[in-house]
């Protein structure tokens, strides 16, 4: 079983990516959210929702907000 699921829902399809990599999950989250999809990042072991974007009120856990910030810093600053 993969650790994370990124579920992107568009008007005409749903795309689910399962991964053990937080880096891959964050990249998928940002890409699909930027393209206008409603996106959830879910822990496949506990069912906890870490992030919800583009549907209703945005939600992110404190841990995932820090992880996303770190990912953005690494990818923007080229560290």
Image (cartoon, rainbow, N blue to C red):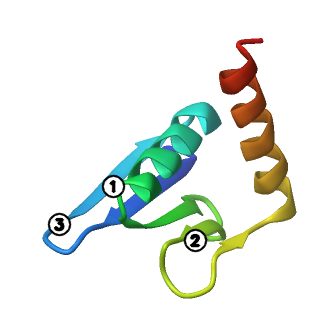
Q: Residue at x 40, y 61 (%)?
A: 7
Q: Earlier in the sequence, mark 3 or mark 2?
A: 3
Where, by quadrant of the figure, is residue 23 drawn?
top right
Q: Which is more toward the observer, 14 or 76? A: 76
Residues at marks 3 and 2 touching, judged by CB atoms closer than 8 Å: no
Q: Which mark is residue 52?
A: 2
Q: Nearer the viewer, residue 3 or 76?
A: 76
Q: Could you tell me if residue 61 is visible in this image?
A: yes
Residue 79: horizontal and vertical position, in percent? 77, 12
- The residue shown at (76%, 54%) is 64
Q: Residue pushed farthest front?
A: 77
Residue 3 location, x and y as percent? 57, 46
Measuring 79% from the left and 66% from the top, which residue is drawn there?
61
| Circle 1 Cα neighbour tier, 10 Å, few/some/many (<14 / 14–19 / ≥20) | some
Q: Nearer the viewer, residue 48 or 60?
A: 60
Helix, strand or loop at mark 3: loop
The residue furthest top is: 79
**Relative to residue 58, is residue 3 depicted above or below?**
above
Q: Which residue matches tag 3?
A: 13
Q: Residues within 10 Å of mark 3 (few under 14, many from 20)?
A: few
What crowding class fits label 2: few (fewer than 14 Cα within 10 Å), some (14-19), or many (20 or more)? many
Q: Secondary structure at mark 2?
A: strand
When asked about the image quadrant of residue 35, the answer is bottom left
The circle on residue 28 is: none
Q: Which residue is mark 1?
A: 16
| Apparent side of residue 14 relative to residue 79 in the rendered image (left or right) | left
- Name which of mark 2 and mark 1 comes first in the sequence: 1
């Amino acid at each position: 079983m993969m650790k994370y699921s990124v579920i992107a829902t568009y008007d005409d399809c749903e795309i689910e990516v399962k991964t053990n990599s937080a880096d891959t999950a964050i990249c998928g989250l940002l890409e699909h959210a930027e393209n206008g999809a409603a996106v959830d990042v879910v822990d496949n072991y506990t069912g906890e929702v870490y992030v919800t974007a583009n549907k209703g009120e945005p939600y992110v856990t404190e841990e995932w907000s820090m992880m996303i910030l770190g990912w953005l810093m690494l990818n923007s600053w080229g560290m």
